[in-house]
Image (cartoon, rainbow, N blue to C red):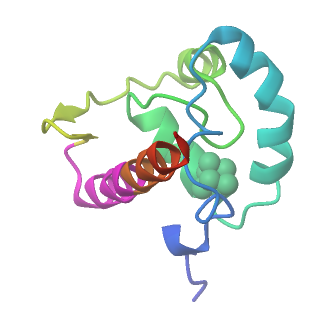
C-alpha cells in the first residue's frame, strides 16, 4: 500500500508563510514563479492542490493563486467549502483540513513574531 505523504513533508514547512501570502497582486505576480519552483517539487503537491481547490483558502497553494484556482475549480466542477472563522485563524470543517490550517496559522504567527522582532 502506498503511503500518502503528510503535511510534515511540505517543502514550505520551514519557510514561514510570508512568501505564500503576498500582500498585493503585484507581489503575487512577482512571487508566483519562485513559489512554483518550490511547489512543483513538493512531495505533497497533489494533496496540497486538492486541499486548495476544495477549500476557500487565501494565498498561494501548490503553485496556484486564487484566479488560477477559480479557473481549475470551474473546469473540474468543484465548489470550495467555506472556512470557519475561529478568531485567530480560519479552518475548514474537515479534521484534516482543520489540522493543516492550524499548522499554517501557527507558522504565520511565528513569522509575524519574527518580523516584529526585526523591527527596531
Ligand atoms: S505544494 Fe503546498 S505544501 Fe508543498 S510547498 Fe507548495 S504550498 Fe507548500
Q: Residue at x 65, y 39 (%)?
A: 19
Q: Picture coordinates of residue 76 (x, y %)?
A: 57, 26
Q: Is residue 95 above or below residue 70?
A: below
Q: Is residue 39 above or below residue 9?
A: above
Front residue (pair 84, 104): 104
Q: Picture coordinates of residue 48 (x, y %)?
A: 56, 51
Task: Let me know if residue 29 is in the magenta part.
Answer: no
Quarter placement of the N terminus: bottom right
Note whether residue 1 is visible: yes
Question: Position of 118 compared to 63: left or right?
Answer: left
Q: Residue at x 58, y 63 (%)?
A: 13
Counting every numbered tag in the picture gives: 0
Q: Which residues are magenta?
A: 93-106
Q: Residue at x 55, y 15 (%)?
A: 74
Front residue (pair 56, 14): 14
Question: Position of 113 compared to 67: left or right?
Answer: left
Task: Let me know if residue 97 is in the magenta part.
Answer: yes
Q: Which residue reaches farthest bottom? A: 1
Amino acid at each position: 500500500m502506498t503511503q500518502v505523504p503528510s503535511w510534515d513533508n511540505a517543502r514550505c514547512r520551514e519557510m514561514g508563510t510570508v512568501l505564500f501570502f503576498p500582500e498585493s497582486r503585484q507581489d503575487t505576480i512577482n512571487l508566483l514563479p519562485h513559489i512554483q519552483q518550490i511547489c512543483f517539487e513538493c512531495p505533497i503537491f497533489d494533496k496540497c492542490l486538492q486541499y486548495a481547490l476544495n477549500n476557500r483558502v487565501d494565498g498561494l497553494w501548490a503553485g496556484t493563486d486564487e484566479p488560477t484556482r477559480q479557473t481549475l475549480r470551474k473546469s473540474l466542477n468543484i465548489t470550495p467549502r467555506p472556512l470557519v472563522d475561529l478568531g485567530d485563524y480560519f479552518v475548514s470543517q474537515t479534521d484534516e483540513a482543520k489540522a493543516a490550517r492550524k499548522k499554517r496559522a501557527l507558522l504565520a504567527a511565528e513569522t509575524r513574531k519574527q518580523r516584529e522582532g526585526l523591527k527596531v
